[in-house]
Amino acid sequence: MRTRWIALAALTLAVTACGSSGEQDAARTPEPATTPAPPSETTSVADLMPDLVGLLAPEAGRRVGDLGLGSDWRTATVRCEARPGVVVRQAPAPGATLTGGSLVRLFAARLDLDEFRGPCDAAELGPVTGADAVLARAFYRFAADPSLGAPFVDGEVWTGIEDGLTATTVSPEQRADLAAWRLPGEYAERGGPFSALDVLAGSGGFYEVHRGVVGTCPGGNDAAPPELAGLRAISLTVPEDSIDSCLQWWGVTLFLDGDQIRGVALRLGSP
């Protein structure tokens, strides 16, 4: 199962990190509907396809594995109608009779950032609430649509990977330009460009807020860039219930001067 999820995670992060999609849009090419056959008197509930729509991908994957079935994961482009990573379609349909060796095709929601970035109105997942959660939401909205602005300090803002593996500064005049936030190179077994804004926009507004720098998965690096050492930080991270491997993990840390953003660091998990 780990191999299957690594493949799905790599596809998802490639889209959110770069804002591009080279994959067939499942939402535009729907699969033929499967009509469940009425169960016979000898068919048990265990022989019927469960309803997986609405489950987050890790939970849906576990249920398919518990049934001893194979799975074929694909993505379906959404806007704000579904949380990214949630199963929005499946085949066979719920209630269909399963046979030995059945293959379950599951479609997980994702945003195509080339077509739509949001922002979406999403539930606050905590655990941090209050003023820091409000600031985090303002930055998410900026990541989705830079024209909305965010509480930045006057002057340049630092942005980089972890504690400065790659970094640049973004001037006030550049802030609305998504390209100014993208970083070249290779990182976490992926090729760039990398952008904290793209990763956060791809979350659809579903993230957790933590105080401090949340260490990279699995290495645990929680160092601040030297330029930002000593500043208070909050981290927006992928919700714990939506991943089952470090390759799917991400974090965006905001370094704060008072209540204004002076730096933005991106962290991506690796195997």
Image: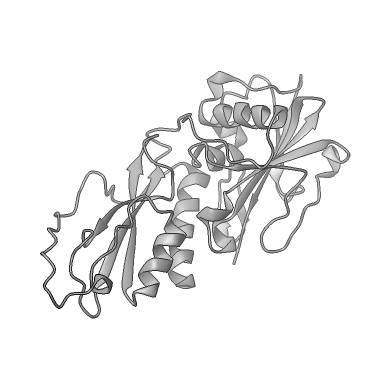
Furthest-right residue in this view: 230
Relative placement, left or right, of 126 versus 30 is right
Describe residue 8's horizontal placement relative to residue 128 as left or right: left
In this rendered view, identify the residue nearer to me: 252 or 126: 126
Q: Position of residue 22 (x, y in %)?
A: 35, 50
Measuring from the top left, give residue 28's x and y in whole percent. 22, 44
Q: Is residue 55 left or right of residue 92?
A: right
| Foreground pick, 29 / 36 | 36
Residue drawn where x is 23% and y is 73% of the image: 47
Q: Residue at x 37, y 49 (%)?
A: 54
Give above or below for 256 relative to 241. above
Of the 4 image quadrants, the one containing the N terminus is bottom left
Q: Is residue 202 above or below residue 191?
A: above
Q: Measured from the top left, where is residue 240 in percent x and y?
A: 58, 54
Q: Nearer the viewer, residue 24 or 207?
A: 207
Q: Is residue 199 left or right of residue 166?
A: left
What x and y, as percent, mark residue 243?
A: 53, 58
Which residue is pictured at 73% across the width and 39% down the height? 234
Question: Residue at the spot x=15%, y=78% of the render?
Answer: 42
Q: How is the image coloured?
A: one colour
Quadrant location of the C terminus? bottom right
Quarter location, residue 91? bottom left
Position above or below: 263 against 163:
above
